Structure formats: structure tokens, C-alpha cells
Amino acid sequence: MKKSLTIILCFGLILAIGSSITTEAASSAKTYKNCTELNKDYQGGVAESSSAKNKGGKTKYKPYVSKELYDANKKLDRDKDKIACEK
């Protein structure tokens, strides 16, 4: 009885720690007010994935790939090509 109770408590603790880590990671991505601010930190913009293709043609810089950062700044992706503030 004690052994199964200990296992259940340990499993619950592991789940609680795991869910708090993913919540912190999702909320830690910085949100930028506009593309000028974002491009100061990421010259080529921010892409959701490495397979995202730019609709606007050739760019000067390669975008930084980060799904969390892209999701936090999705409003800055005006052409909806999965790359925010590309240059």
C-alpha cells in the first residue's frame, strides 16, 4: 500500500514539474511592438520553421528560426508566409 502511494505521489510531482516548465518556456518569448524593434535583435526576421518560404522574393538576411518567438510576434507577419519582419 505504501509503495503504490509513493509511486502515485512521485508520478504526480513529475507531471506538475513538467507542465510548469512548458508554461514558462511558452511565455518567455519576447513580444515586439513593431518590425523595427524585432530587426534590431533578429536582422532577418523570425521564421516559424526552417521550411518556411518567403513570399516576397529574395531577402538580404536569413531569418532566425523559433516557433515560440514567431508565435509571440505572429501579428508582425503581414504577408502570412510564416516569417515575421523578413529583410
Image (spheres, grey):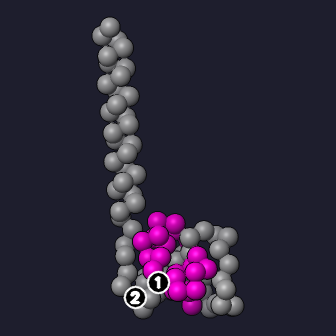
Amino acid on which the number 1 mark rests in the picture? Leu
Q: Quadrant of residue 52?
A: bottom right
Q: Residues within 10 Å of mark 2 (few under 14, many from 20)?
A: few
- Location of the C terminus by quadrant is bottom right
Residue 25 place in picture, x, y as percent: 39, 58
- Location of the N terminus by quadrant is top left
Residue in the foreground of this view, choosing between 41 and 21: 21
* Disc marking residue 34: 2
Q: Which residues are magenta?
A: 65-87
**64, above or below 34, in the image:** above
Taking the spot 40% from the left edge, 88% from the top edge, the residue there is 34
Q: From the viewer's perspective, is 9 left or right of 53?
A: left
Taking the spot 44% from the left edge, 76% from the top edge, the residue there is 73
Q: Are marks 2 and 1 in contact (CB under 8 Å)?
A: yes
Q: From the viewer's perspective, is 24 left or right of 41?
A: left
Disc with the residue nearer the chain's start (2 vs 1): 2
Judge whether residue 37 can be spotted in this image: yes
Which residue is farthest top?
A: 1
Residue in the foreground of this view, choosing between 63 and 31: 31
Residue 50 place in picture, x, y as percent: 64, 70
Q: Quadrant of residue 40?
A: bottom left
Instruction: Tell me the SS state at disc 2.
Output: loop
Residue 49 place in picture, x, y as percent: 60, 68
Q: Residues within 10 Å of mark 1 (few under 14, many from 20)?
A: many
* Disc marking residue 6: none
Amino acid on which the number 2 mark rests in the picture? Asn
Q: Read off the residue under disc 1.
A: 76
